[in-house]
Image (tube, rainbow, N blue to C red):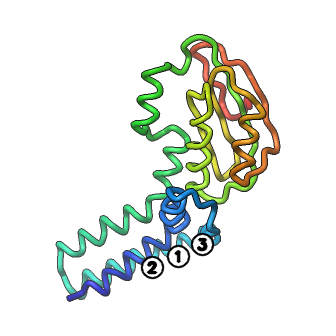
Amino acid sequence: MPVAEYSTAIVGGLLSSSCCLVQLVLNAFSVGCAGFSVLTPYRAVFVGLTATSLGVSHLRHRSMRQSVTALALAMALSGMPELIGLYNENKLASPHLLRQQRKAPLHAGHSQVVGMQVEGLRCAACGMRLKQALLQLPGMTACEVEFETGRVRIVGKELAEQSIRDTVEGMGYTVRHIAFEDEPPGKRASWSEL
C-alpha cells in the first residue's frame, strides 16, 4: 500500500503551512507564537517537494483515489497561509463578520477609523489571533490585519486608544504608530491614507 509515499506529500504540505496550522491549533489553546515562522522562507521548497512527492507516488502506484485524496489534502495545507491572509484582510467573509455587519452596518452613523503599525506579527496565524482579539473590544465593527507589513486597520464607534494598545501589547506585539481618523459615511480609507 503506497500510503507511506503519499504521507511524504502530506508532511510536505504540513511543513509548508506549519506557521499557520500548528499556530492556529496553539491559538485555540491561548498559546502565543511558537516560532514556526522560521520555516516561512523555506515554504517554496516544501511546496516543491510536496508536488514532486505527489507526482512520483502517482506515477509509481497509479492509484487515482489515493492521488486525488493526497493532492486535495496537500493543497489545503499548502494554501492555508493564503486563506488566512484573505480572512485577515476581510477579503474572505467569515460567519462572525457577516453576523456583525448585519447587526451594525459598517457605516451606520458615525464611525472611527484607527490605523496602526504593529511590530512582532510573524505569520498569518498571528495576524488572525490579533484580529480576533481586537474584534472583541467594545465598539469594534471591523478589523483588517496585514501581517507582512504590520498594518492594522480598525473601524468602530467610541474606540479607546488605551484599550486598543493594551490588547495589542498584551498579546506580545508592539504598537509603533496609532492614528485615529474619522471616516465619512460610505468612504473607506485606503491603507496609504492611514
Which of the pair 193/35 is nearer the observer? 35
**The disc label shown at residue 8, or none:** none
The residue identified by callout 1 is 45
Residue occupying the point 60% across, 29% down: 140
Residue 128 point in image, percent of width and height: 56, 49
Task: Tell me the distance, in whole angstroms, between the alpha carbons under discs 1 and 3.
Answer: 10 Å
Residue type of the residue flagged with mark 1: Val
Q: Determine the secondary structure under disc 1.
A: helix
Residue occupying the point 17% across, 79% down: 63
The residue identified by callout 3 is 39
Q: Viewer-nearest of labels 1 and 3?
A: 3
Residue lying farthest right? 176
User: Which picture quadrant has residue 133?
Assistant: top right
Q: Which image quarter holds the C terminus?
A: top right
Q: Which image quarter holds the N terminus?
A: bottom left
User: Which picture quadrant has residue 111?
Assistant: top right
Residue 58 point in image, percent of width and height: 25, 80
For the residue carrying disc 1, how many other residues have a C-alpha within 10 Å: few (<14), some (14-19), or many (20+)? Answer: some
Q: Determine whether label 2 and label 1 are within 8 Å by CB.
A: yes
For the residue carrying disc 3, how many other residues have a C-alpha within 10 Å: few (<14), some (14-19), or many (20+)? Answer: some
Q: Determine the secondary structure under disc 2.
A: helix
Task: Tell me the distance, in whole angstroms, between the alpha carbons under discs 2 and 1.
Answer: 6 Å
Residue type of the residue flagged with mark 3: Leu
Q: Viewer-nearest of labels 2 and 3?
A: 3
The residue identified by callout 2 is 49
